[in-house]
Image: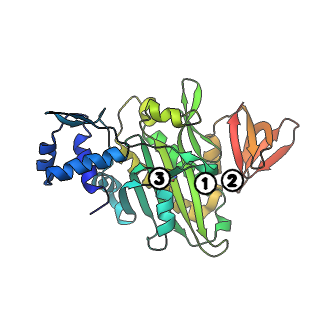
Amino acid sequence: MKQYEIAFKTLAILSDGLFHSGEMIANELGFSRVSIWKAINDLKELNVEIFSVRKKGYRLPKAIKILSEKKIVEALGELSQFVNFELLNVIDSTNKYLLNQSKNKPHATVVCSNLQTNGKGRRGRVWQSALGESITMSILWKFNFGASQLSGLSLVIGIALQRVMQKIGIYNSSLKWPNDVLVDANDDLKKIAGVLIELQGDMESRCSAVIGVGLNFDLSTKQQKKIDQLATSITSVSSKSHDPNEIVSLIIKEIVNVLSDFEKTHFESFKTEWLDSRAFKDQKVQFQKGSGEKITGNIIDLDDDGSLLLLKDDGKIEKLLSGEVSSI
Ligand code: BTN
């Protein structure tokens, strides 16, 4: 039995936000009432808020959408033959899980988690997520070439996410170098998704990438307060309601698409699309290098390896390989 299986089956029943008695849940799932009581306690230990009222039963504070492996695999269609998809109920980090397991998992394994408890962000940050509020997933891709040929990979994943935004009707999204997805929400550019790529293997012969994607789906105010930058979510910027299962399958499809093209053409064929999708067009930005040094200028181009070309205030162009862009 999967970890927290009864807890998440119980959660699926409670996900409508209505009251359900322990007896009714036990009957529906075919488990004892004690098992359901334990499942409720497991969920509470995972910080899931559950109201218990005598004679009425259990209820979540509001309806939530949880992920279903069946729905995601169905939505993948033919691609489900190629992708090895796994839905976990709870994990500390989907990236960490796949990095640890990469030797035993096939190429194109995708791991998605309903609840990620210790998500990793770029540059040593924490990626905040909560049940029903975020999509957290990682893709294991085994390349037939070395890591030295992966320049621009992280920008290409940004492009895949940008394409997903267009597909679900979010047209005011843009990419902040290298791959943050921002959405223009009331004239503020707010982050909706981020990517963390971790590499294993050789520089020259073969390597694997674990590509982690975090997408804010329905951020609560409580969660928003924990995030140290402007952030938004799919539900806040969409006029229609979305099914997270559909979004997960779209992300997988687009990432598989771009990776298959990247294997043939590397970054070259993606450069124009990235530049067209970039945030801060015709606007001065600040760039903080890894060393902490800050420079200002305009993003004018990308080099063939995906590094940023910044036209500085002194008229010189600087090529930047790593660091953080922000608006000024
Ligand atoms: C960023 O800082 O913008 C990158 C965030 C990446 C978060 C995702 S969530 C799924 C995967 N597992 C992790 O621990 N991190 C990535």
- Tell which of 229 and 286 is nearer to you: 229
Residue neighbourhood size for the residue with mark 3, other residues' Cα within 10 Å, grouped as few (<14), some (14–19), many (≥20) = some
Q: Is mark 1 within 8 Å of ligand 1?
A: no
| 129 over 81 or under it: above or below | above
Badge count? 3
For the residues labelled 2 and 1, say whether their Cβ atoms are less than 8 Å apart. yes
Kindly identify the residue that appears in the image at 67 percent across and 71 percent down: 203
Residue furthest top in the image: 186
Q: Which residue is mark 2?
A: 306
Task: Tell me where residue 216 appears, x and y as whole percent.
Answer: 47, 40
Give the mark nearest the N terminus, 2 or 3: 3
The span from disc 2 to disc 3 (Cα, nearest Å) is: 19 Å
Task: Tell me where residue 292 appears, x and y as whole percent.
Answer: 77, 45
Q: Is residue 171 visible?
A: no
Residue type at numbered disc 1: Ser
For the residues labelled 2 and 3, say whether their Cβ atoms are less than 8 Å apart. no
Residue type at numbered disc 3: Glu
Residue type at numbered disc 2: Gly
Kindly identify the residue that appears in the image at 79 percent across and 36 percent down: 296
